[in-house]
Amino acid sequence: MNPSEQTLPDHADVVVVGGGFAGAATACFLARRGVSDILVLEAADQFGSAASGLNASMFRQVATDPVTGALLRASVDRIRNGCWDDPVDVRWNGSLLLVEGERGRPALAAAQAAASAGFDCRIVGRDEATARVPILASAHFDHAIWTPGDGVADISALLWRYLREAKRRGARLVTGCPVAAVEVESGRVAAVRTPLGRTTCRLLVDAAGAWAEEIGALAGLGPLPLTPFRRHLVVTPPQAWVDPKWPLTWHLTDDWYFRPEVGGLMLSPCDQTPWFAGPTPRDPTVLESLAEKLAARCPPLANLPIQSWWAGLRTLTADGRFAIGPDPRLPGFFWVAGLGGHGMTGSAAVGDLAATLLTGGTVDPGLARAVDPGRFLAG
């Protein structure tokens, strides 16, 4: 639909700002809990055009932060086994997370803790890792974390699973509709104003990704410590030696990764440059940095031809953990932000947690405290 042909309702019980994974999953799980009067507003002309559509499409479930790791694993379990009757299109090739030296100990400890809790992952040596991905024979690493249940998803299809279900259950989806103002009356959220009109609401969910702090500012809220970071992805032409069944491979100590992509490889130098919410132009020096890093750490991957490359944004909180919960300064304002590149992987658990909190359901108190945005505002 042409954005200019869309109209807004006069009222919605819940307005969700942002149509990426955070907003789409929250709307879906709210609708599952019986909330049908939902309005999802996406500033761009199509859903998933920002971070949710510019990432590497990878499910990676081992994280050094235990709260984040638990949410990621719960999310992938639901996506794989319980969210929908028909399975989501995912290549479950697994993952190898490479570690080296003392800096690799936190990741190894996280994997051991996850395995002790029953998650299917284990620490393997160089021989097994190289047997799975032979090009690693010349790479520098000591151990690898093998997780057979990781994989690569069709991100657009997954995003639209959430959006279509929310719409089927009564939610209204509107694109090309940035929020221009958030009205506050009697000390709580009252309405949003956009170029397409004004909608009163009881709750506003800020799931705007890199723009989340801007939405908070429109409501008169001081900043939450959310920082967008630019990161580049590079795709090579098809290479005869690439096996499409290779697992995604991420060197956690050196910060680079690769995975099969349409006969070639998708790679990233895991660059992390503070950026702003807006266009993300490419930085040519990143290609040089990637080539130098790979030449030193995995020579066969250096100087590969490039077919396409782009930059996207990942938004992190000050402590790297998600911010999901009500803002204690303004009743009716709820954050689903700071997913830090885990938006796709964590989408089902994040959406379910947000919807449960929004509807007054029961949540583990320790989990609620761990992700509560109010932790940044104490004192």
Image (tube, rainbow, N blue to C red):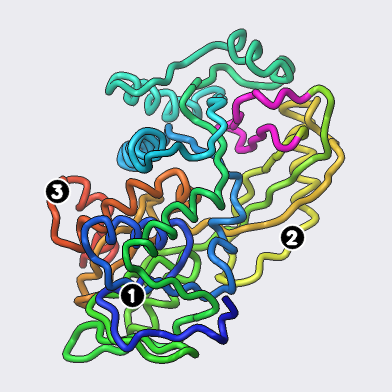
Residue 63 image offset from top left, x and y in percent: 42, 36
Q: Eyeballing the image, is 42 above or below 5?
A: above
Q: Is residue 167 visible?
A: yes
Q: Which residue is mark 2?
A: 282
Q: Which residue is mark 3?
A: 365
Asked whether residue 169 is drawn in magenta, I would say: no
Type of amino acid under label 2:
Arg
The residue segment tinted magenta is 242-262
| Mark 3 or mark 2: whose residue is earlier in sequence | 2
Marks 3 and 2, how far apart at CA: 42 Å
Quadrant (top left, top right, bottom left, bottom right) of the N terminus: bottom right
Mark in the foreground, 1 or 2: 1
Residue 325 image offset from top left, x and y in percent: 25, 61
Could you tell me if the residues under marks 3 and 1 are in contact, i.e. CB atoms within 8 Å? no
Left-right relation of 258 to 346: right
Q: SS for tag 1? A: strand
Residue at image coords 57%, 44%: 154
Asked whether residue 245 is drawn in magenta, I would say: yes
